Image (tube, rainbow, N blue to C red):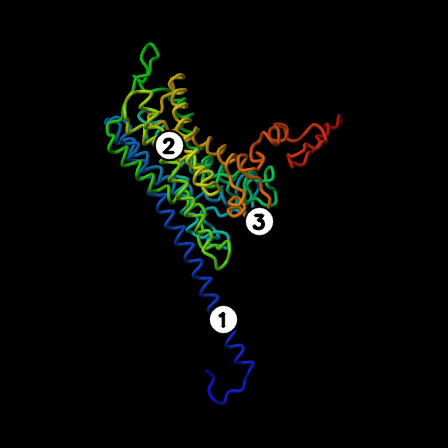
């Protein structure tokens, strides 16, 4: 390569090393490109859920309110995009920060950086507007779009970002990624947002519907429930399938990277975990759909496609927290219980004369809460350590031999709700350090 008369061994060695460095840089560049492409593709899938929400909402309301509900879904994306760009992303992920709220990267300042690229912003924006889209169904048919515009901007620009900071930022007080200060030794394992996305949207919708009250005619003068059915089951089914499709970006995409080997040179890596997450998501939704189908048949005597669609989505909402850390068989249990939770929440809604045209609060709030509990029961030790590396010995699921350390009950109410323990003592098996609360000085 240097010619026949070259004897400069040092120069030859330097040249060869440069070639190796060049090849190494190419592999590094390729890894970044693959991961970024994967994340962008996942963001596009999650964004497609907006179309799913729009069709689901349109089909679930009466024809005279179709234009209004479609406009609210467009506003989620439009207003959410601007406000999440200006404030939301910074509040959610701006680092370094405190445990409550982020304080850097407003209007994407200093991005791209070693922490985030533009693809990460786009992915998180798609999540933010999904949370807003959940609530549009709860307050459908009785909300003026100007009021909804204000709500949507506030939710995507402040409320959702603050909650996502708590649980997903490396600085969040309850984040499983906050290795320097893990809440109860584990952080909250909510991989793709049963709590962060679905409960936030569901609870916001709950309060909105309570403030507005039920639609005229939803309950008769005796208090009996009167069904105000949507005008198009076809749109409901179309919206459900679009949401199902988008969920494959929602859950598997939450890894944000795919080119991460667990055992270098082996067939098993993060790509395997991504595939497993897609499988658990599928099984939970399918089980919930079938459970709802036969359950509603027993209760009402009818096969109802709209109820089945809601059951399916309830299963997805529930599995979203633990989709990456549970076995496929556990996902079947998750879906079955999610269908029961949704049915129970709907019965409670009728009892208390609560009107939610899309069952959004019951579906996303109720099933999302079950998803957090389900994860604490069925998270597998091996998967927890793979998905949340850097802190060996994390707590895992109660039914998987983990001793229930992911549940607050193990720590006790004093620690989780009152700031510490009253006595210095050691509780065998808890593995949780105890701290005495000293009385405040009388002076």
For mark 3, give the secondary structure.
loop
Which of the two residues, 342 or 64, is positioned nearer the viewer here?
Answer: 342
Relative horizontal placement of residue 343, taking residue 96 as reference (left or right): left
Measured Cα–Cα span from mark 3 to mark 1: 30 Å
Q: Residue 308 placed where, x, y %?
A: 32, 30
The residue under the point 36% across, 21% down is 355
For mark 2, give the secondary structure.
helix
Which of the two residues, 109 or 298, is positioned nearer the viewer here?
Answer: 298
The residue under the point 48% across, 54% down is 260
Reading the chain from its start, which is encountered first: label 1 or label 2? Answer: 1
Question: 10 Å neighbourhood of mark 3: few (<14), some, or many (≥20)?
Answer: few
Q: Quadrant of residue 73?
A: top left
Of the two numbered discs 1 and 2 in the rendering, the one whose residue sits closer to the viewer: 2
Relative horizontal placement of residue 41, taking residue 62 as reference (left or right): right
Q: Which residue is mark 3?
A: 390
The residue furthest right is: 443
Q: Quadrant of residue 396?
A: top right
């Amino acid at each position: 390569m240097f010619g026949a008369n070259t004897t400069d061994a040092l120069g030859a060695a330097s040249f060869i090393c440069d070639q190796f460095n060049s090849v190494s840089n190419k592999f590094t560049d390729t890894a970044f490109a693959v991961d970024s492409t994967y994340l962008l593709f996942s963001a596009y899938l999650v964004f497609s859920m907006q179309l799913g929400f729009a069709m689901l909402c349109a089909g679930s309301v009466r024809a005279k309110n179709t234009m209004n509900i479609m406009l609210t879904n467009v506003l989620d994306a439009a207003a959410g995009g601007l406000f999440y760009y200006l404030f939301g992303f910074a509040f959610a992920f701006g680092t370094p920060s405190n445990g409550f709220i982020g304080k850097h990267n407003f209007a994407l300042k200093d991005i791209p950086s070693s922490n985030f690229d533009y693809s990460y912003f786009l992915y998180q924006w798609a999540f933010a507007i999904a949370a807003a889209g959940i609530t549009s169904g709860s307050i459908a048919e009785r909300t003026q779009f100007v009021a909804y515009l204000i709500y949507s901007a506030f939710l995507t620009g402040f409320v959702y970002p603050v909650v996502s900071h708590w649980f997903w930022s490396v600085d969040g007080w309850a984040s499983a990624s906050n290795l320097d200060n893990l809440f109860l030794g584990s952080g909250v394992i909510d991989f793709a947002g049963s709590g962060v996305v679905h409960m936030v949207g569901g609870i916001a919708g709950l309060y909105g519907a309570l403030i507005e009250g039920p639609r005229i005619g939803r309950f008769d003068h005796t208090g009996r429930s009167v069904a105000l059915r949507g005008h198009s089951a076809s749109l409901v089914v179309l919206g459900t399938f679009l949401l199902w499709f988008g969920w494959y970006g929602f859950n598997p995409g939450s890894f944000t990277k795919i080119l991460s080997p667990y055992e270098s040179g082996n067939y098993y890596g993060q790509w395997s975990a991504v595939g497993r997450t897609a499988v658990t998501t599928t099984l939970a939704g399918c089980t919930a759909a079938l459970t709802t189908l036969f359950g509603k048949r027993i209760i009402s005597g009818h096969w109802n496609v709209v109820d089945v669609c809601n059951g399916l989505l309830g299963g997805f909402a529930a599995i979203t927290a633990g989709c990456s850390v549970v076995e496929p068989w556990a996902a079947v249990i998750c879906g079955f219980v999610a269908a029961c939770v949704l049915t129970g929440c709907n019965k409670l809604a009728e009892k208390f004369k609560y009107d939610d045209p899309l069952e959004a609060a019951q579906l996303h709030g109720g099933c999302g809460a079950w998803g957090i509990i389900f994860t604490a029961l069925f998270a597998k030790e091996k998967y927890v350590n793979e998905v949340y590396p850097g802190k060996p010995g994390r707590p895992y699921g109660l039914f998987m031999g983990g001793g229930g350390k992911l549940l607050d009950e193990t720590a006790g109410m004093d620690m989780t709700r009152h700031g510490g323990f009253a006595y210095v003592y050691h509780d065998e098996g808890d593995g949780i350090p105890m701290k005495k609360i000293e009385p405040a000085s009388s002076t």
